[in-house]
Image (cartoon, grey):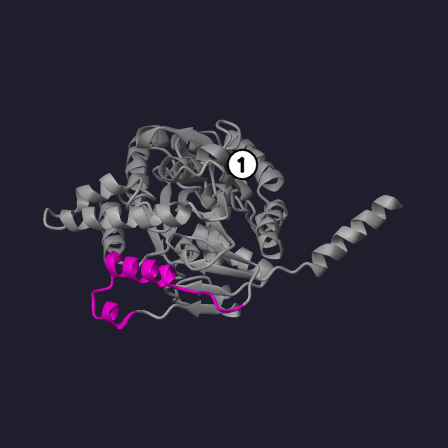
């Protein structure tokens, strides 16, 4: 009896205590894992969103049902070619100078530099998908891609951004890292040893195993660090190993940005795929296509380099499919090697494991079932919001304290 009264009081409290949450996000222009997490949080709390850029035609349509506020762009930026420099100026300075005037309990920042909202506003919980990779962990890589006359500008710009970033991050009240990989970056670059790890959940009931149509599937937005070129490379090696046996295809599906750097990469992957053959590319697939492709594939390949977290491996496991991922970053935390998927070093090992899965469907099916069980037990949204609710209340209490 007393237990029932306690449960009823808890439910009543949760109904009464309604947080006024405001979400900040650098842009809403793609359909990716980070956008999925943000959408779920916004729906759960019915939270308005402040963003630097919004394209309802290229991101999840459910955002149209929410209150999305676009930060006004400086007219000078509109005169410049669309690209990373303009995006960086607009997003960064937009949030850096923004003062929220409406009442709120907590501001929930997402993709950097939306966390710069902390400069003029208090009670910020940053759900860190990753610090700004261009000036931190990918700085050397980006420098190699710059022409000689671009490098001095990049050096100066990165130095200024790091100083601003450090000055703001030290004051953020609460940080969730979406993986241990991201927590390590927060410690390394900002000294924030207090960041907690909380990976995003998935709607696992949407996914199912509808058989094997003999193709490997890689769902991810097109970007060099996502490694579609590596998926093609692995598939080419697999074809050589699999010569004379049942034929397989590779399907690449994901969002394509209009940013020139990323659109050029998409075209490069397309040319590479044509040379290899038996590869289908589906740009900007919708949710229905996305889930259907999961359900009928042989296995998921995930060759992302030092992935921040990785929603695709979880969705693959939820679909009852074996996942073959690079042994680095987020997938090392979500995949149990040789039990719910496979962790490999490089494209040669990936190709060999693809052949193994193709030749041993009963083992792949067993691995897929174990993955499905793991997702249900550890990566539901119910488990996610249990911790998120508690953290938001902790930050909001500073307003009442």
The image quarter in which residue 137 lies: top left
The image quarter in which residue 54 lies: bottom left
Q: Is residue 359 visible?
A: yes
Q: Is residue 103 positioned above or below 265 on the image?
A: below
Part of the protein shown in magenta = 74-102
Farthest residue to the right: give it.
1
Q: What residue would you read off at disc 1?
A: 368
Foreground: 79 or 267?
79
Q: Is residue 321 positioned above or below 291 on the image?
A: above
Looking at the picture, how far across and down is residue 320, in whole percent? 54, 40
Looking at the picture, how far across and down is residue 393, in whole percent? 61, 51
Residue 80 covered by magenta stretch: yes
Q: Is residue 223 visible?
A: no
Looking at the picture, how far across and down is residue 197, in whole percent? 51, 39
Looking at the picture, how far across and down is residue 363, in whole percent? 52, 29
Neighbours of disc 1 within 10 Å: few (<14), some (14-19), many (20+): many
Q: Is residue 4 positioned above or below 72 on the image?
A: above
Foreground: 291 or 330?
330
Residue at screen point 39% across, 50% down: 168
């Amino acid at each position: 009896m007393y237990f029932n009264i306690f449960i009823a009081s808890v439910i009543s409290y949760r109904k009464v205590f309604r947080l006024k949450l405001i979400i900040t996000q650098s842009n809403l222009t793609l359909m990716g894992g980070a956008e999925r997490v943000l959408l779920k949080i916004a729906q759960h709390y019915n939270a308005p969103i402040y963003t630097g850029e919004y394209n309802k035609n290229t991101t999840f349509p459910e955002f149209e049902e929410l209150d999305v506020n676009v930060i006004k762009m400086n007219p000078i930026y509109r005169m410049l070619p669309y690209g990373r420099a303009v995006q960086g100026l607009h997003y960064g300075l937009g949030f850096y100078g923004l003062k929220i005037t409406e009442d709120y309990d907590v501001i929930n920042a997402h993709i950097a530099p939306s966390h710069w909202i902390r400069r003029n506003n208090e009670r910020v919980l940053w759900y860190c998908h990753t610090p700004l990779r261009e000036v931190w962990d990918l700085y050397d890589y980006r420098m190699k891609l710059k022409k000689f006359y671009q490098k001095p500008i990049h050096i100066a710009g990165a130095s200024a951004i790091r100083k601003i970033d450090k000055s703001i991050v030290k004051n953020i009240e609460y940080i969730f890292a979406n993986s241990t990989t991201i927590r390590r970056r927060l410690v390394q670059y900002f000294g924030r040893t207090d960041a907690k790890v909380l990976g995003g959940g998935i709607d696992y009931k949407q996914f199912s195993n509808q058989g094997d149509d003999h193709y490997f599937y890689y769902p991810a937005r097109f970007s060099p660090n996502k490694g579609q070129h590596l998926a093609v490379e692995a598939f080419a090696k697999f074809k050589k190993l699999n010569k004379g046996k049942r034929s397989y295809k590779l399907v690449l599906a994901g969002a394509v940005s209009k940013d020139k750097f990323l659109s050029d990469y998409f075209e490069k992957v397309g040319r590479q795929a044509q040379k290899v053959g038996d590869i289908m590319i589906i740009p900007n697939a919708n949710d229905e296509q996305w889930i259907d492709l999961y359900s009928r594939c042989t296995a998921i390949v995930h060759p992302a380099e030092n992935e921040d977290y990785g929603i695709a491996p979880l969705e693959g496991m939820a679909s009852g499919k074996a996942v073959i991922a690079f042994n680095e970053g987020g997938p090392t935390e979500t995949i149990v090697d040789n039990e719910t998927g496979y962790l490999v070093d490089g494209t040669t090992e990936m190709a060999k494991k693809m052949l193994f899965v193709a030749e041993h469907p009963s083992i792949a099916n067993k691995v897929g079932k174990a993955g499905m069980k793991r997702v249900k037990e550890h990566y539901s949204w119910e488990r996610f919001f249990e911790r998120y609710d508690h953290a938001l209340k902790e930050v909001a209490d500073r307003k009442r304290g």
